[in-house]
Amino acid sequence: MLIKNPLKSVSYAVSIALVVGFIAATPADASYENVYNNPNLFYVVDKQHKLSLNYDVYAGGFKALNASLVMDLDKRAYDMTLEAETQGFIASIFPWKASFNTSGHADKGALTPTIYKERNSWRKGVKITEMSYAPDGKVLKTTTQADGKTKTDRDINDVLARNSMDLLTGTLIILQSVKNTHKCTGQFPIFDGKHRFNITLMDDGKEVLARSQYSSFEGEALRCTIKVVPVAGFKEKDSKRGWMAVQNHTEAHHKLPTLWLARMKNSTQIVPVRMEIASDYGSVVAHLSKETEN
């Protein structure tokens, strides 16, 4: 299958996968409600701390992308930001940049987003998607800015948004589960403002990774495969874009995207430390290159 703008799709896929890497051990019929009925998934933070992770991504042997994931966590609130941008020669051909941010509050182990914002720029085009939430986690409205136009939707399709959450909030909710179960199995419901889908992780054993000139991590990691299962809001053209394009491509090669998760030596957090996507133009590999906590 030919993917239009392949590196743009892979770049977006890598960014999403860095977030998806946290999602694990949720019920087979996962929903927002089920998540909060499972104590293994509760968000627990003893004190405020900020974790910053940097990733270098290589495609076919060339450095293609820089990405950073920042988690600012507190007992009663949280803020997460993921940023990614193509680099070097690759950037001159595929000039892509994106940022994802969510902020919310925590109450007795339950996280509720306040606002989620996603910004994508491709060449001269910029698209911004924003979702606002009620105190109970219900999506109040989505706002999209693209091509000089702004569209606000307050009548959100219940099939799309009910009992779901944004990618970054979903990331935090399952941290406790990954920490307690040491597994990457199950699926998790996500709504991105347009599509409803389940992220499915499948356990693929453990592996000891060595430090290298590319990776700052060394030690044992969980090896997981990732799959996105569309639920609602998808159109035929979506199969040729972003993560779905990459996933369909790799499935045709009988190799799903693979992610390695591990605990940092100086942190209690479980984080993605490596990921790999197969492609016709060589493997796309993301390495954790630097981590700081304060």
Image: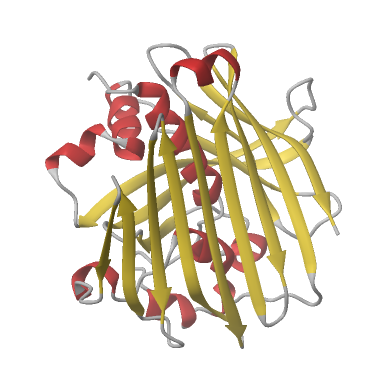
Question: In the displayed structure, does residue 215 sit left or right of residue 168?
Answer: right
Coordinates of residue 154 in the picture (x, y in percent):
25, 76
The residue depicted at 58 percent of the width and 45 percent of the height is: 83
The residue depicted at 28 percent of the width and 45 percent of the height is: 147
The residue depicted at 56 percent of the width and 75 percent of the height is: 104
**Residue 29 appears in the figure:** no
Vertical relation: 30 (above or below) 5: below
Task: Say which of 289 and 104 sits in front.
Answer: 104
**Residue 259 appears in the figure:** yes
Residue that sits furthest to the left in the current view: 236
Vertical relation: 10 (above or below) 225: above
Task: Say which of 175 and 291 sits in front.
Answer: 291
Vertical relation: 83 (above or below) 90: below
Question: In the displayed structure, does residue 116 sit left or right of residue 235?
Answer: right
Q: Quadrant of residue 172?
A: bottom right
Coordinates of residue 138 in the picture (x, y in percent):
36, 81
Q: Quadrant of residue 257?
A: top left
Q: Where, quadrant-wise, is the N terminus in this rendering?
A: top left
Q: Quadrant of residue 47?
A: bottom right
Coordinates of residue 233 in the picture (x, y in percent):
19, 56
Coordinates of residue 88 in the picture (x, y in percent):
60, 17
